[in-house]
Amino acid sequence: MTSLGFLYPGHAAEDDYPRIEQLLGADIRLDVIHTDTGEDARGVDALRAAGTPERLAAGVGDLRMAGAEAVVWACAGGGFVHGWEGAHQQVRALARTAGMPASSTSFAFTNALRELGLRRVAVAATYPDDVAELFTAFLRASGAEVTAVAAAGIGTAAEAGAWGEDEVLALAVSADARAAEAVLLPDTALHTAAHLQSLEKAVGKPVLTANQVTVWEALRLTDRRVNAPELGTLFTRGYVNPSGV
């Protein structure tokens, strides 16, 4: 049994994780611990506050008790708003506190792109414009080329979590660009686990979504390979590479 740990901010789309667990197979367990977010807001200051060392450390003990072998901070915005170096410092601090390999959703995206050999991407963000721009800056710092960005301007995780398949598909399609090799949806508050095949069919290329890449990143940290076509191209192409952050 491989036990993977996730620190998930508040409550929005955490039911993506049991859905993904079911698709991965009986020998993989996904343990989700909810962290305090303070204010449910998508402003830069609120996102930075959501990922403080103290808030992340508060959930680590429960994950250790559950037998987690790796931990991922399951929040894209709470990582990339710190910038490339700041996000690295956040993950290193989490690994020291947890005493196990650690990463974040932000690095899950960049590692997944590297694994798939993709560089040109379109970003379909639920965030306000300024937060979406910080994500694109993070991607560029990793070496990716952002060809197009669509920002929906959603101000809270609760609002993003209430979106259904139609809204998710519309956002992805609106962001897609011919030059893009993949479309990225960077919000763990957005339900996407049930829509990955529909998303890839709609845009005709790989789609990477926040909860999907977060689980993939935890598998990468534990050097697990899983073939799960329902979870999109990321779970069917290539090998989960143990190198990275």
Image (spheres, helix red, strand yellow):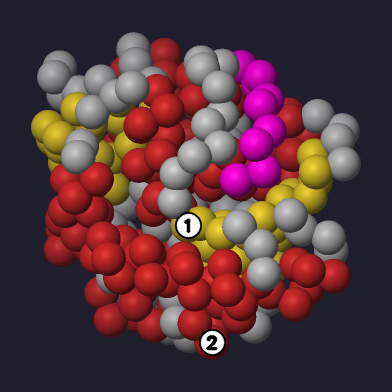
Q: Is residue 224 magenta?
A: yes
Picture mark count:
2
- Residue farthest to the front? 243
Residue 118, image quadrant: top left
Badge 2 density bin: few <14, some 14–19, many ≥20, Cα 10 Å = few
Question: Circle 2 sits on which residue?
Answer: 54
**Above/below status of 75 relative to 168:** below
Disc 1, SS: strand
Front residue of this view, candidates 81 and 200: 81
Amino acid type of the residue that numbered disc 1 sits on in the rendered structure: Ser
The magenta stretch is 221-229
Question: Circle 1 sits on which residue?
Answer: 104
Residue 108, image quadrant: top left
Left/right of residue 205 with respect to residue 36 in the rendered view: left
Amino acid type of the residue that numbered disc 2 sits on in the rendered structure: Glu
- Where's residue 205, x and y in %? 34, 16
Query: Quick one: label 1 or label 2, which is nearer the N terminus?
Result: 2
**Above/below status of 146 relative to 245:** above
Could you tell me which residue is drawn at 67 percent across and 55 percent down?
A: 70
